[in-house]
Amino acid sequence: MEQEKIKALTTFLQAAGQRERLHILGIVAEGATAVPELARRVGVKETAVVKHINRLKQANLVTETAPYTYQLNQDGLEQLNRAVFHRGDSNSQETLRQRVMRHYTDGPRLKKLPENAAELREVAAWLVERFDSNVSYPEKEVNQRLAQAHPDFAEMRRLLVDWGFMARSRGIYQKVEPQP
Amino acid sequence: MEQEKIKALTTFLQAAGQRERLHILGIVAEGATAVPELARRVGVKETAVVKHINRLKQANLVTETAPYTYQLNQDGLEQLNRAVFHRGDSNSQETLRQRVMRHYTDGPRLKKLPENAAELREVAAWLVERFDSNVSYPEKEVNQRLAQAHPDFAEMRRLLVDWGFMARSRGIYQKVEPQP
DNA sequence: CTTCTATTTAGATTTTTATCTAAATAGATT
DNA sequence: AATCTATTTAGATAAAAATCTAAATAGAAG
């Protein structure tokens, strides 16, 4: 068990411990980004970016949110943090979010939809991370992005609208900013 | 400036990002440890330990507190933390300890003694880290360990006793446990 | 269905890293 | 001073990783 934590930690450290990858992390932390843009901003060939991304994925640091575009995996980071810094058994104060992530998701994929309302809301909050603010998405693109998580994109799309995470107007969708 | 932070971060991540070095860090975090013991507990040759230690030193993760023995460099860790996570200029709440470290020390070396009492006390608190609890040190060994920091070991030894960090009894010194 | 473009995979080359053996250095002991 | 022991440095070898070129794959557009 302890061995697993150490492995997770070294994988993380090695993945993050390089100028280019750190740069990539910095960029994807600000929002989902595609490979060519990463290559341009970091200043390396696209093939190199792909290799870096793969390592970062292995380390649970990024996920593919839309086709060919990657984003910082905050849930994975959260998991790592818990695994490494908090004792595994006692005083583990798991949040609803964390429990839902653990039960219903597998990296970027949604294993199945929960039934309970509070849990559905968490899933919706998680799904909406695949979209940027102040961008208009045609329904087709919304479907596409959601399909990355689960085949039943229509159900997930409805979920996002029902819980107020996205707004639809004349077939165009926009992310609704959460109230702070 | 930003570049420096990135370099410090990658150096740190790479240094920590390996099973053996992580193991070494875990051991020296519990107390000063010599090379042969590290080699034994980690299960590699001593020469390999030396190389690992050198990388850890470069990354400011360990310091040589007594001859041939190493310890986790908590001040360096603190510095790294500040450099990476806190904005360099504004809202930087530097503690007395941090300021004294920055002014009067250079890694494991003491550049010169402060004049002010509060600062002297911090230096003494820093020096006493080179000693373990419940161990009796003859004066000669105390001098030896302190000489790693500065040639004037007698002055530093007096400082430790004056400020109640070490107790002397018949030429034998012992670390005094700080009151929590 | 075919072409076009974007992205990923494979293979080869160069660089970096880890580990070993053997030699050098530094302190302690006699 | 000379030897003895503990530790570090050098040099060599092997393993891992980074980056490139070129080929393969997948989706979109015509």
Image (cartoon, coloured by chain):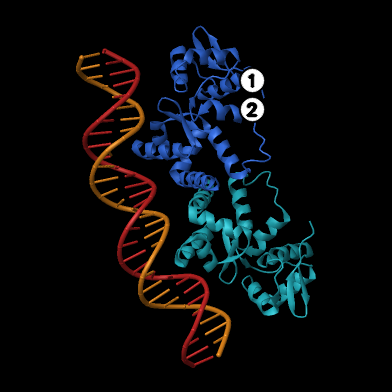
Chain colours: A blue, B cyan, C orange, D red
The residue at the point 57 percent across, 13 percent down is A161
Q: What amino acid type is highlighted by mark number 2?
A: Leu
| Residue D6 on image: x %, y % | 52, 74
The answer to whether C19 is drawn above or below residue A164 in the figure is below
Query: Do tag 2 and tag 1 residues touch (Cβ < 8 Å)?
Result: yes
The CA distance from mark 2 to mark 1 is: 9 Å
| Residue B111 on image: x %, y % | 64, 68
Determine whether, in the image, residue A69 is placed left or right of residue A96: left
Residue wearing tag 1: A118
Q: Earlier in the sequence, mark 2 or mark 1?
A: 2
Chain hosting mark 1: A
Residue wearing tag 2: A96
| Residue B147 on image: x %, y % | 63, 74
Residue A66: image quadrant is: top left
The answer to whether A43 is drawn above or below residue A3 in the figure is above
Secondary structure type for disc 2: helix
Chain hosting mark 2: A
Find residue B53 and name its label. Answer: none
Q: Is residue A177 visible?
A: no
Q: Which class describes the residues within 10 Å of circle 1: few (<14), some (14-19), or many (20+)?
A: few
The residue at the point 71 percent across, 77 percent down is B154
| Residue A84 on image: x %, y % | 58, 44
